[in-house]
Amino acid sequence: FAAKHTWPMAAQPSSDSTSLRAADDTEYIALCTAFHIGQRVRTVDGLDLATVRYIGPVAYHSGLWVGVEWDDPSRGKHNGSHHGVRYFYLAGCETAGSFVRTTMLTTQVSFMQAVTWKYDYEQALSQVCFRSSPGFQVPVQILRQDNDEGLLPFLEAIYLADSCIASTDTSGEIAAALPLVRELDISGNNLKYWEQVQVFSQEMPFLHVLNISRMRMQFPTQIGSSTRFQCLSVLVLNETLVHWEEFCALHLVLPQLEELHLCNNAISSLNLGGAKSVSECFPKLRKLNLENNQINNWEEVLCLSDSPRLECLILNGNRLEALNYPQRDAGTVKSSTEKRWPCLRTLLLGGNQFSQWASVDELNCFPQLQEVRLTSNPLPALGGAASIRM
């Protein structure tokens, strides 16, 4: 191939596309538009999943290649090295790497395609095989009763994380094929818009648990209530970089939400301004996980204090330095502050920046608090003790 694509044998090509000498090549630019390092891909026949580890030329071979790490290590051929040159590193098994042409890979799979490839009995029967020691695929014939209806109509839980799903099917196709699904995990896929997720509110009317983590979707600023998740009680939205205001704008379509996970989203504020309060948006919320965000002011946390059913609040790994419980007005028997944290039983505050025991003393004011975690905070030792176990 062209000289600009050739490296000495001792070179160490980088997976960073900005450092590759082929960056000005039209073919390379087109390749980087379709693929990127860390992207999940699937073979066009749907049989194998992999992660992109390298994009570019390979010595002694023409054209451009995609270096991948296969989910199935037996599909691989090497550790990312070729003729003494290290092109990429593997996260798992040291024999799970190989180079493939782009024509073998796809990043655009529909939801029902992914379901069929993983769960459909008829599809599985046509694809069952094992690999012999030389690496050849040997088909296996499976005998079954003719009246077997297959697996899809009976599925109650579907796990399709990192399956390259880029679109969701509509017009009743999902509902007809999967009438009983109650739990769905499609984290780490390629959906770009909340509206693609909203499809499941109609196609899966009994859905109770939904995990859509690790997808960078666009969320609507306003949304109607015509297509609600009528049964959804648990929602996981970790590593999506969704803002608190963006999520709360979805409250009309999540009327039954009881458990919410928003970890690793760089959230710093919980204040909705002049909009509805959190208690008004999600009156049934019992558990809220905000672990590993960027909340540094307890006043932000107080925006949650009037949640009528909140029992568990997880704030590990934030930047909180102090906390306080609002005191009653002097001389009154009963005040509105008594309604703060009415049901909170578990408060996890590990890995923050609490450095004063006065904040710990404030925990005695929480009316229902039973469990507290304060590990990995810079609290001073008491009575000369070297360490304190909370």
Image: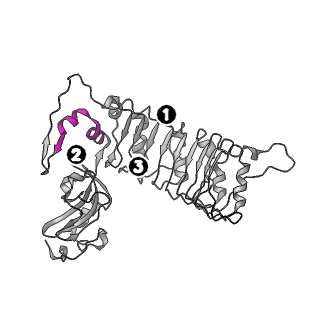
Q: In the drawing, does residue 3 fall left or right of residue 280?
A: left
Q: Name the chief secondary structure element in magenta.
A: helix
> Would residue 276 be visible to someone looking at this image?
no
Using the numbered discs, state the Cα–Cα distance from disc 2 to disc 3 in whole angstroms.
Answer: 27 Å
Which of the labelled discs sits on residue 47, or is there none? Answer: 2
Q: Which quarter of the rendering shows the N terminus? A: bottom left
Residue located 85% across and 45% down the image: 332
> Would residue 170 be visible to someone looking at this image?
yes
Q: In the drawing, does residue 191 fall left or right of residue 293?
A: left
Using the numbered discs, state the Cα–Cα distance from disc 2 to disc 1 in whole angstroms.
Answer: 33 Å
Q: What residue type is labelled 2?
A: Leu
Outermost residue, right direction?
A: 331
Using the numbered discs, state the Cα–Cα distance from disc 1 to disc 3 in whole angstroms.
Answer: 21 Å
Which is more foreground, mark 2 or mark 3?
2
Q: What residue type is labelled 1?
A: Cys
The region drawn magenta spans 112-130
Against 9, is 99 above or below? Answer: above
- Going from N to C along the chain, the mark reached first, 1 or 3, is 3
Which of the labelled discs sits on residue 193, or is there none? Answer: 3
Q: x, y (%) of residue 355?
A: 66, 64
- Going from N to C along the chain, the mark reached first, 2 or 1, is 2
Which of the labelled discs sits on residue 382, or is there none? Answer: none
